[in-house]
Image (spheres, grey):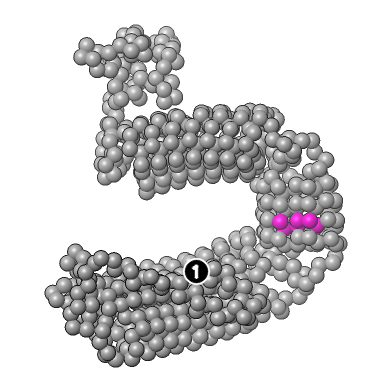
Amino acid sequence: MKKSLKIMSVFMSAMLTLGSLGAVSLTAGAQESIGTVTKITSGDFVYTVEDNVATIVDYTGSANALVIPQTIDGRKIVRIGDYALSKKAKLNSVVVPESVESIGSSAFEDSVDLKKVTLPDGVTKIGPSAFYGCSKLTTVNIPAKLEEIDDYTFSGCTQLTDIKLSESVTYVGESAFEGCSNLNSVTLSENTETIGDCAFYECDSLYSINLENVSQIGAGAFVYCANLDDIDLTNCSLIGENAFSVCQSLINIKFPDSIYSIPQTAFEYTLWEQSAPDGVLYAGDFAYKIIGDFTDSTLTFKDNTYAINDDFLSYNEYVKKINLPDSLTSIGVSAFESCSNLKEITIPNRCSVQAMAFYDCSSLANINYNESMVWTAPSAFCNTAWYNSQSDGIVYHGTAACAYKGDFAAAETVKDGTTIIVDGLFYGDEVLTSINLPDSVEYIGDMAFENCINLKKISLPKSLYTLCDETFLGCESLESVELSEVVNIGVSAFAHCTSLKSIVIPESVNQSISDSAFLNCTSLEKVTINGDVQLIGAAAFLNCENLKSVNIPKSVGYIGADAFEFCEKLTIKCYENSYAQHYAEENGIKYLLIDEERLVGDINNDGKIDVNDVTELQKHLAGHTKADDTPIITDSDLNIADITNDGIIDLRDVTALQLSLSE
């Protein structure tokens, strides 16, 4: 709530006072965090004990200069607790001992006379609002091991003049330095990657900050930094709403070479934007926005323009023709939405067209493109004259299945020659139960079949090389899928496919099974990995509660966090001294070692494959057992008996074994 109100305050000055109100909600009730832990008083300090080390939770003295001891009653002090030194009148300086590793939330909040704090380099954590409202604080060192500046940490420290972050700091949190009105210089570490929302809001004296290594800048991060005149954003990939709004002196900006979306409010009321002439305003070679009212009939972009921003010229009734340069690689979301008099467009080679880019361009009848154009959004040309002239069903443009018109059908057939199925083409299609894909399909986009809750079966063509992110996410009726020749399985590709019982990862998959690929596939029982997979991502099989068997090849060198969490029935099949064996041991997962010397098909384990193995396999399928009543084929033998490599032992394996002997 606080964040959105602050961003609105760029235009509503009456909201400016809400910044201080928001901090109160962060501190409410924090004193209860001590719970039933016994508090011990020793002199002017109150502390608690856990694992024989102490946390200072209060100070009852009246010292102006406080030096906190390293030990208290023989116990090492490792933490300054939440609110421990908050609202301490007359406290001017504090030295925190070398033993302390963390500073709690609001630890010094509203100690309005505090001027200097000395922190040890061993501190790794400083909690939110730790120095909030310390309006006289002028000197504080950032510990060498600190990893982040938490939310509101120095908010309202109006006498701070300069800050140098240690090399370990990667993140500056929301409103971390908000309202530090005398802060004029900030030195970020080379490792600082993220600046949170409103982090330097109303730091109106700030004139110097090094942003060249920062990759993300949050909404309202530098609003009202009136003296900031020069910034380097060359490595920034995300810039939030109003990030630099009302930076009235900001004139010199170095933009990244490859950014594809910047909110049009990001630089409002900066000198850079206000001094620009009417027409296209470029951020480097990125077409950022239109300055002034565009009333021309033709819009031409400069050579080397690589992308056009979201909402670039939407709802314009004047433009009839747009000249796009060959260098263009992306047209943003709603870039030309509802340009009602636009009649024709030529899309350059290798250019992607984002969602609703030309939506509702009611006069747009001719769309020209090269076969190498990249389609990404089914809504890109919806409700244009061209789209409205198409027949109901799958809409094609060249070799791309690019949109869907009318009501969905239960059975779909993609026409021969189609190479691309765009992102989200059948997203949320609750009618679809089956689909036939031609062998020509090379690309199926992100979310192409997401939440097709009645889709039961699909066979992917051999020409398909990548399974994109969330392709079949939420297809809760999907019982079987043939992966064919894909080389990579994308993030959440089959997540929440709760009817899927088995999956065979083909030999072609030699890269990764990505994060959350099969998350919450609660009916999944067996996974057969035939390829030289290198990586199994985080949460790849999380909560596959019925998963019993996964074979993991020697090639796997990394298994991410929680990859098999809550798979209580799982036995991993792996090779001795492999990464998978060590992973299973470290995570308490049952495992069976695969016999490298044994031949596939050697059912009776006599070192050769012959008709006796066929007989043993037939006996097993008929329900026979060995003389000691143990199974003819045990769990550890499954890979030996699965001749067809489909994850199932059945008559097809008998037939395949017989055929191999007849050759």
Q: Position of residue 274 (x, y in %)?
A: 70, 78
Q: Is residue 37 above or below residue 384?
A: below
State which quadrant residue 576 falls in: top left
The stretch drawn in magenta includes residue 335: yes
Q: Going by the image, does 483 lie left or right of 363?
A: left
Q: Is residue 381 above or below residue 61?
A: above
Q: What amino acid is labelled 1 in the image?
A: Gly
The stretch drawn in magenta includes residue 227: no
| Badge count | 1
Q: Which residues are magenta?
A: 334-339
Residue that carries the numbered disc 1 in the rendered image: 196
Q: Position of residue 182 (x, y in %)?
A: 49, 87
Q: Nearer the viewer, residue 422 or 608?
A: 422
Q: Nearer the viewer, residue 641 or 140?
A: 140
Q: Position of residue 269 (x, y in %)?
A: 67, 78
Q: Going by the image, does 384 lie left or right of 610?
A: right
Residue 437 appears anywhere in the view? no
